[in-house]
Image (cartoon, rainbow, N blue to C red):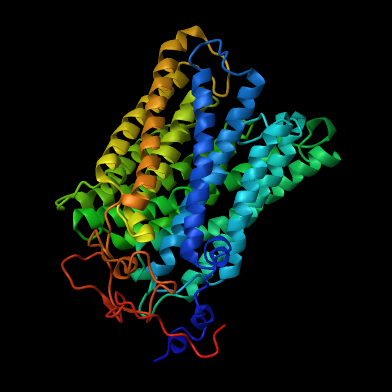
Amino acid sequence: MSVAAVHGGGIADHIHPEPQGFIRRYVFSLDHKIIGIQYLITGFVFFMLSGLLAETIRTQLLNPNGGFVSPETYNEVYSIHGSAMVWLVVIPLLTGGFGNLVFPVQIGARDVAFPWLNMLSFWIFPVSGLMLFSSFLMGAPTAGWMEYPPVSLQGQAGTSMWCAAIFLVGVSSTMTGLNFLVTILKMRAPGMTFTRMPLFVWGQFATAPLLMIATTALAAALAALFINREFGVPFYDPTKGGSPVMWQHMFWFYSHPAVYIMILPAFGIISEVLPTFARKSIFGYKMIAFSSAAIALLGFMVWAHHMFTSGLAPFLQLPFMILTYIIGVPTGIKIFSWTATLWGGKIHYSTAMLFAIGFVALFTLGGITGIFLAAIPFDLHVHGTYFIVGHIHYVLVGGSMMGIFAGMYYWFPKMSGRLLNETLGKWHFWLFFIGFNGTFIPMHWLGMLGMPREVATYDPQFTFWNRFETFASYLMTFAILIFFVNIIWSIRYGKKAGANPWGARTLEWQVPSPPHYYNFKHVPTVYGLPYDFSQPLPYKGLEDELTDSPPPVAAGAH
């Protein structure tokens, strides 16, 4: 049977001679794997820049009276730091990066559905990032990553540049979500039913509609803010009949689902790493898979729990509090299933496994403080304090970034053909884990004692813990430096990995490292789940994948 017959003709469009020139092969590439690596490299560059801004914040807070930068510069720094970490680091790394790199191979596809759209989606991303950081040249935004009016209406010209940059990131994300959704729906290998898909694919499948739907609300809000600032149309200006609270509704209608855009793919990474290094089938596969879909749906129903202090009517606050408690149920299902997967397993404590276990621990703590914040009386007490800063970093650094590091140590051999150094990796993990907790645990009690967030100076009674946090953050930064040294060293000198150094069972590990240009010489047939280590591999058609012969080129392909 021909490849075209297997896929109804659609996949044959991707079978054309591999480009030979450097520009077409590595710069303006149509290969989803190269595009994934481009996302990872660009995302980590922005991660380094955002990290430098974070250390500027912490250095400013070494002393109660600040003094490292001016209060105005401090406001610009934390605004760009938060914006960059959300839209230029976490989302692109998890969706554009690992999503492109891994999931098409995991479902037995030779590429994504729309390769040209995929290339365009990537190139919008660095352009928007350069726009965001260039806002420093004209006066960066000063109202935080949320840019609440009316403060954002009064900001310097860089706030309009911020609107344009985040709007463009949203365009890129929307196209990526559409591309991924069509790929998963239409290009799975024969036998790859929804209940046989790897759980990382489920994470991307649940994320894609969020990228497409929620981002539209943010785009409308950003366009209105830009028009309000540049043309005086009073969408959010209360002095002319506008409503600043409307921005909050539209922003959080996107930004709470965005929390799940930043965590659902990380859930998928953890669900791949844990069974591989526990040598045990994943516990509750269908519950983990379907809970991702439940989280994606419920994520649209809880946005106003960010707005308990905004004057929201009391009879509306209660449903949002209850729904916030309910969304903890599918998340709890995942944590229980991961813990049960580890129970009784033959655990190999690789660096990827350490980051995965660290993810479960830290994200659980972030979830517990989220339950606290769902309670209206508690939220009224700590809203706008450092408790919120601690909470969001446990979710997005203890969660998303730990997942990203787990994914890097797990899939680096697949993208490069070489292993990362495990000794350096373990130093990276333990220093990062200790530094992270030292930085963000004290923020919770500082917040309950009343230290406000987003301030360049503070009451001297909070001096000790702020200095403690700052020195812990330096330790965390040193750990990240070890990570980058490990990557640069291992690309050239790392131990050769072979096709499957972990003995994993998903499809991406059954082809060479790095994979062929077309991923598979012959599209495989799937007849079972990939997580049962007691059974033979559930694939047919992979017999000659590790030989050097090229894949067949379909007649008439271009």
Is 234 located above or below residue 31 in the figure?
above
Looking at this view, is 126 or 254 the one in front?
126
User: Which of the 4 quarters of the picture holds residue 102?
Assistant: bottom left
Residue at 49% over, 27% down? 55
Residue 385 is left or right of residue 366, and the answer is right
Residue 442 is left or right of residue 119, and the answer is left
Camera sees residue 125 = yes
Q: Position of residue 258 (x, y in %)?
A: 53, 47
Is 474 located above or below residue 514 in the figure?
above
Residue 139 is left or right of residue 206, and the answer is right
User: Which of the 4 quarters of the picture holds residue 282?
Assistant: bottom left
In this rendering, the count of numbered labels is 0
Residue at 70% over, 43% down? 163
* Residue found farthest to the top: 460
Residue at 30% over, 51% down? 494
Is 519 located above or below residue 470 in the figure?
below
Looking at this view, is 462 or 448 the one in front?
462
